[in-house]
Image (tube, rainbow, N blue to C red):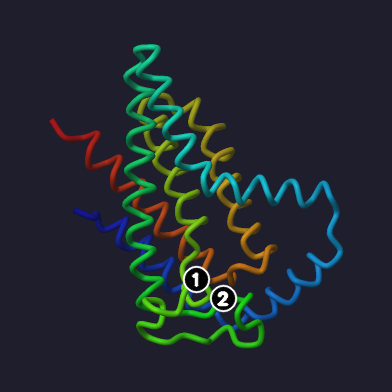
Amino acid sequence: AMTSSEAVGLGLTTLAAVAVIPIDQRIAVWMRDSAQHRHRSLDRVFTGGRLFGSPGSIGLGAALWAGGELTKDNAMANDGVRSLEAVAAASIVTILVKRIVGRASPSANTSDARNFSLGRGFGGGGSYQSFPSGHATAAFAFASAVTARVSNRSSAQASWLGPLLYGAATLTGVSRMYDGSHWFSDVVMGAGIGTVTGLLLVRHFDHRP
């Protein structure tokens, strides 16, 4: 079951996502103008961020699991398993919310960040499944699950790995806005769902007898 701190974290994330909707359009316009002055090196950075979210979160989780199995490193193998479970569970939640909320993405309607329609995401296609960001969800689910696993073994290792993974996940979120695929609030909500899911799954499975 979700702890009170996890519930509060998800609730605060939801409130934050709702609170930033009024500035979504301004951020999207600024991101669009920035994207019009693209630099090859910047494009590579944001492409890397997008790929970290998908398919990177699944590929890295699978690599950890396979590497642990091959080297008989149970901790590494379980890191991979927990991260894959977190990405899968968080993605299921996000996909369901996307379809229920039915929000138009910036690529579908750049002039209206409040374009929501209940249930439209079930039949409106990807252009109306903007909220939350699936890439951000997956990236933060992977980052939180692996960081939580590592911190249970070594706080020193987690002290540098955590910022690295969460930084990569943040880059994933920014890349989705840079590409014009998501609003800022989409990314905030995806980050919250992914983070809480990763923490919840690691706590639940790793503390069972």
Residue at left offset 23%, top offset 55%: 2
Of circles 1 and 2, which is in front? 1
Q: Residues within 10 Å of mark 1 (few under 14, many from 20)?
A: some
Q: Residue furthest top?
A: 71
The amino acid type, in three-letter code, at marker 2 is Ser
- Picture coordinates of residue 207, whole percent (x, y): 21, 35
Q: Residues within 10 Å of mark 2 (few under 14, many from 20)?
A: many
- Near-viewer residue (77 or 129): 129
Residue at left offset 40%, top offset 12%: 71
User: In terms of secondary structure, where does tag 1 sit?
Assistant: helix
Q: Which label sits on residue 105? A: 2
Q: Which label sits on residue 126? A: 1
User: Would residue 165 be found to the left or right of residue 146 on screen?
Assistant: right
Q: Which label sits on residue 192? A: none
Quadrant occupied by the C terminus: top left
Residue at left offset 66%, top offset 82%: 110
Residue at left offset 51%, top offset 45%: 55
The amino acid type, in three-letter code, at marker 1 is Gly
- Picture coordinates of residue 89, whole percent (x, y): 31, 52
User: Would residue 73 be found to the left or right of residue 125 on screen?
Assistant: left
- C-beta proximity under 8 Å, tags 1 and 2: yes
* First in sequence: mark 1 vs mark 2: 2
- Picture coordinates of residue 56, whole percent (x, y): 53, 41
User: In terms of secondary structure, where does tag 2 sit?
Assistant: loop
Residue 10 in which image quadrant:
bottom left
- Near-viewer residue (157 or 88): 88
